[in-house]
Image: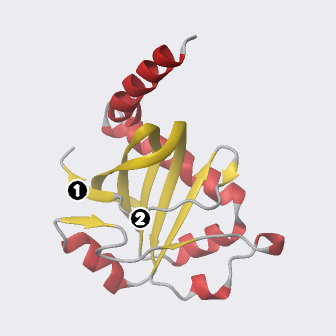
Amino acid sequence: MSFRLFRQRLLVLLLLCPLLAAAHNRDELDAHVHEAIHELYRTSAAARELGAKARGMLVFPRVFKAGYGIGGEFGEGVLLTDGRTVDYYNIASASVGFQLGIQRKSVVVLFMTDEALQHFRTGEGWKVGVDTSVAIVTLGIGGEIDTDTLQKPIIGFLFSNRGLMYNLTLEGSKISRVAR
């Protein structure tokens, strides 16, 4: 395959990210959400403990990112409180720079305090890194989460079917409430 053809196909996939990540209905999205939570808890016992203490949990089970110089990312998710879906959201971002390829990940954001959850829910939209800071989990020896992260009001997990992903960020991602 020629480089030009590869680039064209990659750009088509970039444009299709929203279609790849979109669930067809609420039931399908809810099923993907519960699968993602199960996968996170299977990967990390500490995530299970934090999830039980969280005041709210924002889950994006399928976030697709594609790029070739210009990149984009999109996913749909839900906000859970007390284990029930209360709102639907999407996450999107765009970037420019050295990047090549396609990736799928899951994102879980835990709101550990009532204040953090309320701030998120009352906003029109939420841009990570501008409106708030999310402590991205990195696991240390033995799979333990460092104590500094445990003190944060908002904790984020980025993972795939291969486990937690390292050196990733949510900076610049826009999270918006959507009607479903």
Quarter location, residue 82: bottom left
Mark closer to the chain start, 2 or 1: 2
Q: Is residue 92 above or below residue 70?
A: below
- From the image, tell me which residue sits under label 2: 171
User: Which disc number belongs to residue 177?
Assistant: 1
Q: State the residue at coordinates (37%, 72%).
A: 129
Please rate how many residues cluster around mark 2, counting C-alpha atoms within 10 Å: few if below 14, some from 14 to 19, many from 20: some
**Where's the N terminus, which quadrant?**
top right
Mark 2: which amino acid? Glu
Residue 21 location (% of width, % of height): 40, 36
Q: Is residue 28 above or below residue 130?
A: above
The answer to whether residue 86 of the structure is visible from this angle is: no
**In the structure shown, which secondary structural element does the residue marked by tag 2 occupy?**
loop
The answer to whether residue 120 of the structure is visible from this angle is: yes
Which one is nearer the viewer's eye here, 91 or 114?
91
Q: Is residue 159 above or below residue 154?
A: above
Residue 164 location (% of width, % of height): 66, 57
Camera-side mark, 2 or 1: 2
User: Which disc number belongs to residue 102?
Assistant: none
Quarter location, residue 16: top left
**Where's the C terminus, which quadrant?**
top left
Figure label count:
2
Colour convention: secondary structure
Residue 43 location (% of width, % of height): 71, 57
Please rate how many residues cluster around mark 1, counting C-alpha atoms within 10 Å: few if below 14, some from 14 to 19, many from 20: some
Quarter location, residue 125: bottom left
Q: Is residue 11 above or below residue 53?
A: above
Mark 1: which amino acid? Arg
